[in-house]
Image (cartoon, rainbow, N blue to C red):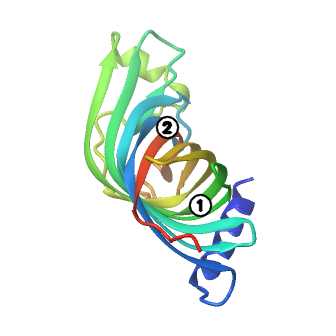
Amino acid sequence: MFRPLVLAMTLAIPICASAQVGELRNDFAIGINGGYLLNRVDFSPTIKQTWKGGETFGLTFRYTCEKYFSAYCAIQAEVNYANMGWKELIETSDDKYSRNIKYVQVPILARLAWGKTAMVFLCAGPQVGYYLSETEHRSGEWTTMNLLLRPNQVTAQYGKVVERKFDYGLTGGLGMEINTIIGHFTLEGRYYFALSDMFNNGKKDPFGRSANGAIFIKGGYLFDIIKTKKR
């Protein structure tokens, strides 16, 4: 499902860049966004987890450049704060473990939207992020025996700080937008797939992969700075 979405948005970029196809527009809007995310980290060797929740919010910048048949083509950029990390599912003891990892994230999205007052849209593109801070949360006895009972005896993650501060990957999703005289209201779901690892992954390192994967549910509000005048 995700690959066709990326392909569709990749095809939208040259449409926006063309000056001779479709109805040209010059709309620029800015606003805010916020919501909730569910994150897991893809570890190799595997660490059993449940989805860890966290908050996300930030700024949105959108430039709509063209109406191509019934589709509005736009480029959207965001600067967001996101509380990522992971939460382990420990079934061999009463120990509990989770980690919050805070990032600033910048997705650059191609966006296609259909409709007028009520619109549906899909978006996709690359995303980069930078590590801000992290905190570990532990509870339970945390005895040597309990650690030995961990699946595959994987314990190298405990106390191990993020070694690769730069995070990057692909993101995309779909949503709806309501347009009013006071601005644009949006609601969307989005998925982020990291291509980078947070820990070093050399032959002597404990993890071959340690990449984020997150589901975002976000709402937003934008208002027009520049709006194409109706003919």
Q: Amino acid at mark 1?
A: Ala
Q: Residue at x 48, y 48 (%)?
A: 181
Q: Residue at x 33, y 40 (%)?
A: 101
Q: Is residue 197 above or below residue 19?
A: above
Q: Amino acid at mark 2?
A: Asn
Give the CA separation, mark 1 to mark 2. Answer: 18 Å
Quadrant in which residue 16 is drawn: bottom right
Q: Residue at x 74, y 62 (%)?
A: 4
Query: Residue 103, percent across and down?
Result: 33, 48
> Left or right: where does residue 60 sit relative to residue 74?
left
Q: Which residue is mark 1?
A: 124
Q: Residue 1, labelled with which disc? A: none
Query: Residue 205, percent across and down?
Result: 40, 53
Q: Quadrant of the C terminus?
A: bottom right
Q: Residue at x 65, y 50 (%)?
A: 119
Q: In what element is the residue under mark 1?
A: strand
> Left or right: where does residue 3 sit relative to residue 139?
right
Q: Which residue is mark 2?
A: 39
Query: Residue 81, percent across and down?
Result: 33, 46
Q: Is residue 124 visible?
A: yes
Query: Farthest front residue?
Result: 231
Nearer the camera: disc 1 or disc 2: 1
**Badge 1: residue crowd in 10 Å (few <14, some 14–19, many ≥20):** many
